[in-house]
């Protein structure tokens, strides 16, 4: 009798501890989001979003940083999306389980683990100096897309693999070639999963600073970039320089910048989650 | 028609295959460029000088030990945060929480993984560091401790998601068996489920270490960036400087091809090798676990 009392007491204590640990993990996350929103909201106005910075960043808006982050995200998508999806198709539909495929998988895992600042070094060495693209949107986008690649490949492969084998068997037995099967049957079925993965990958790229530090980010530009060979301002880099390198920087502008970046990143996250849950609800297999 | 179809098919297959190999190509390219720009450092600076304790590039002191110890102390501190909180949260989500709560908690933890590291660094400067300074009565709040706390938070989503996967992979029969023998839910978790998932948890911790040691912006913003040897007990509450922060802070100002430039690439090479080792080790743990599970279940 006494033992079972002890046991239930231990269980109570254990579960309380786990609940406490989880709360201590989750509550600060919510607190960060709420805090940034509350501190940043007063800064948000049409002129903050649509004007150039003035007075050494201490006044005006953050338009070039917003536009720059959009350009970098799009540039990253241009390179990483087709390459990543094609690589995923190879792994899910063509590759046999042999040493080469294992090597590809190890390479993907390693790409995912390489520190972001090392990507920056690589981009500097290959794109900026060796290929002479200079400090530019092009160099930064290429660097970010290699960093994003493992995320997109893994997510897209998982989406492709979740399409039931019967779909392939039926299509092939009706005379479809392998590519026709992929193109018309598998890809449409896997599309929501692929899009979710792509958005989550691009979300990471949009928030990154270290890979663009020496490949494409500019402290301040008096005009918007008008070619892929121009350097650009970007939201995360702007937040970094204004919070470390500009003396007497008004807090409100910093929190405003942080909020815009947060909305950008969270917005992508929410879109990805909605697409995923809608597709799950609609799925008939 | 039939012919052009097979021809098109061949082209597409070739393109897809080439893209499939791209990951290998990029890893090799990254390694090659780090070697190409980083190895000259070994010719320009004596190995004994690289292993010295003074990092002062303007006067050609390139001792890497302060940076190495800085990275180690911040990462170790981060793990002290990420392991209990990450594994605890994963166990709660996988084993204790009811379904609806799981659906709320999982996206929240994923949200933490999606927060840009520069934003956490920004809050570290404005909120965490002043708090630590007054709370612990320090000369500055920008310390290894601030870096460890934030890095721990950054590593948590990695630890949670992999540990949770490992717990999910434990066969339901294990739990049912334990409960049928009269164990409480807590005993089942503590003595059966968690031990069965331990190699997954180990993988999670290793990848968490990899994530923490490679993190750049947050540590650069909150650790104070003083390149001093971090080997004392109170180093945790002093400013330190990590390898990643050194590259990020100094690469913008060095002349292309100078010794300083080569040494920074050499540090990048060291980081690359560390992350390679961590990831290969982590994936062999998973591989071994799979093999053992197959042996047990067959």
Image (cartoon, coloured by chain):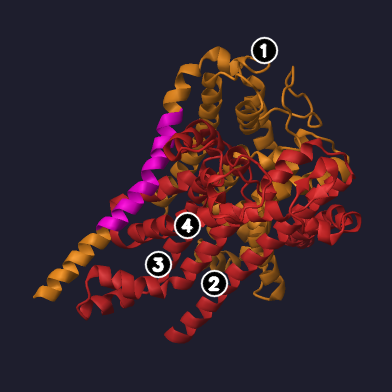
Chain colours: A orange, B red
Residue highlighted by disc 2: B286
Residue highlighted by disc 3: B167
Q: Are marks 4 and 3 on the same chain?
A: yes
Asked if the residue under mark 4 is in contact with the one under mark 2, i.e. CB atoms within 8 Å, the reply is no
How far apart marks 4 and 3 lie (CA) works out to: 21 Å
Residue found 52% across the figure and 53% down from its top: B78
How far apart marks 2 and 3 lie (CA) works out to: 13 Å
Q: Quadrant of residue A223?
A: top right
Q: Are marks 4 and 1 on the same chain?
A: no
Mark number, residue B86: none
**Screen quadrant of the N terminus of chain A:** bottom left
Instruction: Give the main secondary structure of the magenta stretch.
Output: helix
Label 1's element?
loop
Asked if the residue under mark 3 is in contact with the one under mark 4, i.e. CB atoms within 8 Å, the reply is no
Dot 2: within a 10 Å radius of its alpha carbon, few (fewer than 14), some, or many (20 or more) residues? some
Q: Is residue B19 left or right of residue A69?
A: right
Dot 1: within a 10 Å radius of its alpha carbon, few (fewer than 14), some, or many (20 or more) residues? few
Q: Earlier in the sequence, mark 2 or mark 3?
A: 3
């Amino acid at each position: 009798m006494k033992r079972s009392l002890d046991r239930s007491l231990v269980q109570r204590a254990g579960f309380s501890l786990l609940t406490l640990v989880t709360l201590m993990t989750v509550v600060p996350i919510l607190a960060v989001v709420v805090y940034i929103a509350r501190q940043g909201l007063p800064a948000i106005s049409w002129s903050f979003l649509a004007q150039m910075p003035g007075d050494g960043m201490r006044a005006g808006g953050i338009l070039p940083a917003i536009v720059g982050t959009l350009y970098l995200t799009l540039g990253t998508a241009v390179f990483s999306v087709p390459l990543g999806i094609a690589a995923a198709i190879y792994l899910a539909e063509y590759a046999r389980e042999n040493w080469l495929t294992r090597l590809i998988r190890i390479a993907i895992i390693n790409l995912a683990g390489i520190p972001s600042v090392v990507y920056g070094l690589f981009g500097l060495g290959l794109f900026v100096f060796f290929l002479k693209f200079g400090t530019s949107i092009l160099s930064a986008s290429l660097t970010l897309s290699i960093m994003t690649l493992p995320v997109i490949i893994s997510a897209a492969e998982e989406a492709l693999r979740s399409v039931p084998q019967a779909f392939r068997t039926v299509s092939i037995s009706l005379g479809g070639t392998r590519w026709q099967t992929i193109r018309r049957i598998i890809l449409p079925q896997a599309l929501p999963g692929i899009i979710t993965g792509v958005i989550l990958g691009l979300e990471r790229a949009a928030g990154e600073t270290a890979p663009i530090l020496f490949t494409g980010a500019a402290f301040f530009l008096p005009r918007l970039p008008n070619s892929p060979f121009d350097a650009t301002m970007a939201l995360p880099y702007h937040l970094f320089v204004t919070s470390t390198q500009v003396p007497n920087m008004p807090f409100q502008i910093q929190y405003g910048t942080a909020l815009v970046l947060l909305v950008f990143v969270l917005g992508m996250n929410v879109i990805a989650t909605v697409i995923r849950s809608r597709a799950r609800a609609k799925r008939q297999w | 028609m039939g012919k052009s179809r097979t021809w098109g098919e061949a082209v597409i297959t070739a393109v897809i295959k080439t893209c499939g190999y791209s990951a290998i190509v990029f890893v090799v390219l990254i390694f090659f460029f780090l070697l190409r720009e980083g190895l000259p450092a070994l010719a320009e600076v004596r190995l004994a000088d690289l292993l010295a304790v003074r990092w002062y590039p303007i006067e050609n002191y390139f001792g890497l030990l302060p940076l190495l110890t800085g990275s180690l102390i911040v990462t170790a501190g981060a793990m002290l945060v990420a392991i209990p909180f990450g594994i605890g949260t994963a166990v709660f989500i996988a084993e204790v929480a009811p379904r609806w709560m799981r659906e709320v908690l999982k996206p929240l933890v994923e949200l933490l993984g999606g927060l840009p590291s520069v934003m956490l660094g920004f809050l570290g400067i404005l909120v965490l560091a002043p708090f630590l300074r007054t709370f612990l009565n320090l000369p500055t709040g920008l310390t290894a401790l601030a870096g460890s706390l934030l890095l721990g938070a950054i590593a948590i989503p990695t630890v949670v998601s992999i540990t949770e996967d490992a717990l999910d992979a434990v066969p339901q029969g294990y739990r049912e068996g334990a409960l049928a023998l009269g164990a409480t839910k807590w005993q089942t978790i503590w003595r059966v489920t968690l031990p069965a998932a331990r190699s997954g948890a180990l993988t999670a911790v290793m990848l968490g270490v990899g994530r923490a040691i490679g993190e750049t912006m947050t540590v650069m913003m909150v650790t104070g960036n003083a390149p001093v040897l971090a080997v004392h007990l109170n180093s945790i509450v002093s400013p330190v400087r990590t390898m990643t922060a050194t590259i990020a802070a100094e690469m913008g100002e060095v002349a292309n091809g100078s010794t300083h430039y080569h040494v920074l690439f050499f540090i990048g090479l060291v980081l690359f090798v560390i992350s390679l080792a961590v990831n290969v080790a982590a994936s062999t743990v998973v591989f071994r676990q799979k093999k053992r599970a197959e042996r047990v279940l067959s």
